[in-house]
Image: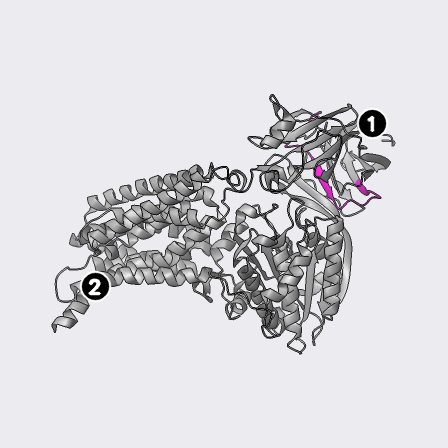
Amino acid sequence: MSRPTHALRRALTRFGPAAAATAAAAVAATALTAPRPRAQDAPDRDFSAARALRHLREVASEPHPTGSPAADRVRAHLLAELKELGLETEVQDAVAGHAVGRTPYGPEYLAAGRVRNVIGRLPGSVPGRSVLLMTHYDSVPQGPGASDAGVPVAALLEAVRALRADGRTLLNDLLLVFTDGEEAGLLGGRAFFDQHPLAATVGVVLNFEARGTRGPVLMFEAGPGNGPVLEHLAHTGVPVFASSLFDAVYRRMTNATDFSVAKQHGLPGLNFAHIGGFSRYHGPLDDLDHVDHRALQHHGDLALALARRLGDADLAELTGGDAVFFPVKRGTLARLPAAAVPALTATAGLVWAGGLRSALRRGTLDGRRLAGDGALLAAKALAGAAAGTAFTAALGRAAPEFRRHGDFHGSGDVYAAVLGLASAAALAQRGDRSRAASRAAAATLPLTAASAALAGALPGGSYLTLWPWLGAGTGLWLLTADDTGRAADLRHAAGATAAAVPAAALLLPLTRLLFDGLTPRLAGTGVVAVQLAGELAAPALAGLDPRVRRTAVAGGLLLAAGVAARRLARRGKGTPPPETLSHLHLPERGEALWLSSDATPTPRARAALGDTPEHGPLPELFPGWNYSFHHAPAPTVDLPAPRADIEGEAPGEAGCRSVRLLLRSPRGARQLSLAALDTGVRRWRVEDGPWSEPTARTPSPHAPAGPQDGGWELWLHGVPDSGIRVELELPSAPVRLRLLDRVDGLPREPAGLPAGGTGPGEHHPAAALHVDTWGNASLVAATVRIPARTHPQ
């Protein structure tokens, strides 16, 4: 062998595995890159984020929650644009209500209200089935909703404009549905799928959402029998970042979108959202200044490409077997049938077990060392998870937004710091080839347990450990083979590459997703992923020069230290702390209260609460809530109490009576809350709609006095000035209900109320998360007394 050839071989065997692992991670990371926004002068048939901004400015100029004048203005814009595009349009004016789920502060969230969905229809050449593009047009009261869901709204309008520029008719009908009341509890989605005739024509649903302000767009949830529709997604030519892991995990979460209602109806489809920038979600900073134009382009490209493909597809063929899927590089989606997971798991298990047994028998792996390395890996994983979590928690003390969101404004530097710490820990441990192989073998032990568990309980997430496990098992055969002969170095390099590359390609890009999806509050999860990948890459990294290793370790530590120093030095600067401060008026008592759900009230809130506010729950006002408020006496205001007129009662089921109430807010509040103080409510309905079903969480109407099982509370949204009718099944004994109306912001009088400015350093309303959803408001409460049964037994 010539000297140049020998030198090349030495370089490849020494540095090739590390280079291959680095390249695999870099290629996989490109899947997280959204497309560049297209300019105003892009071809008519293309989607242009610049053109879509016109709609976004109209939609997101101010908060526009359900039932508000701003929502009316947005709805008018949508109707005008759909008509301009030549679609048949209508407004579905409906009442919907249902049990959404248990709240983190106690009672089950029951939501109902009047919604106005905007519907557009583009007839196809073969009438019958339809492709549904949907998003919601309402925002939370706390912010203008530029990303949630202004970006998807603008994307769908521009996508349909580009589709119309094709100048041809699709095979299938195309439906656009902009739902109302999504933020109030999926009310618009419930109204459309439960009540509208066009819902029966839907063959596939494509829902577009946001859980933050930064892209890229993820496909995080698929409908039943997702294999065929995923084939269409994979062939759009648009960069796709989708994973069956997201889908499998999301199914087990309490989160919901309008797509959740579509799935309950058994419809196939896909759910998209961008989730970066969670710290601005549902708050005042979800504004036009923080819109990610790349995310807007990504939403639009996906909507346009899928509308074209599915518009001409046979929608009857869109259900089949479920698939396991994941991105392997930008724009490429790997797919395999979920039914194949058990066989692949068994195959990987045989390869791994055979390699491990062979190495132990030959003595190239020492059983005691392997056990020690396994124990060391477990200790490092625990320590790394704790260190990563503690690091972000320490930085969070200097970031007011961290308490509620668990995230930072502009969290990229924090992610880089956490990655630097994790990488430093992974590179710090040295060892010869034998020790490196033992470390990689030890890392296969948690992979074995995880792969077996995922194959049975969470097949959609199995790919995440299955392929690294198979690669590491293959690597075991090669790394622990006879270390003599001319091909020994090539065999070792191949084994190191096999062990490192799958983990680098799948686990390392996952860390950014875990950081965004689980928030930096749980940064330790990403650290564990890096450490596991680092152990599997130990043979590949064994050839690195010690100086290179020391430099990389020092660089990771210095990066983390620099980020920490900069963040801590900025403490108290920039965005003021998020705040909740509400005024609760009690006309019956001639009293009022200041309320704050802040753990530590802001200076403005402290000025209202005084030096010695009380702290605790308020069961007479918020029955069943397990949350403690700061509260103190407040000036009274001249505001009328909400009213409940008893319109009649009739015998109900199970020995109950049905009481019909007309609920109104004389001051025009768009939200009302009705809660039971002394007993449970067996069933309820709104505006003669369907009755709710009694559940295990519904207290018995014959129960003794006192709210049970978290209490019963119904929130009503979009309440018109004429009021809204509610019917309750109640026991025959006298009943007390608490009726409360809510208006965004503090009342304007009397003088002396804290200023409501929103400039820097003044007032920054907390986001609509957890109990803060109901904060920063003027509340007026009244007691509704329903006498004992009046009709004959």
Work out which quarter of the rendered image holds the C terminus and state it: top right
Q: Are marks 1 and 2 in contact (CB under 8 Å)?
A: no
Tell me: residue 476, above or below residue 700. Answer: below
Q: Residues within 10 Å of mark 1 (few under 14, many from 20)?
A: few
Q: Residue furthest top?
A: 612
Residue closer to the observer: 562 or 468: 562
Instruction: Please tell me which residue is depicted at 66% across the width and 58% down the height of the picture.
Output: 57
Dot 2: few (<14), some (14–19), or many (≥20) neighbours within 10 Å?
many
Residue identified by numbered label 1: 788
Tell me where residue 522 sits by quadrant.
top left
Residue 714, magenta (yes or no): yes
Q: Residue 310's x, y, as percent? A: 60, 70
Q: Position of residue 203 (x, y in %)?
A: 64, 65
Q: Which region shows up in magenta?
A: 704-726
- Identify the image quadrant of residue 640: top right
The mark that comes first in sequence, 1 or 2, is 2
Q: Which residue is mark 2?
A: 13
Looking at the rendered image, the quarter that the N terminus falls into is bottom left
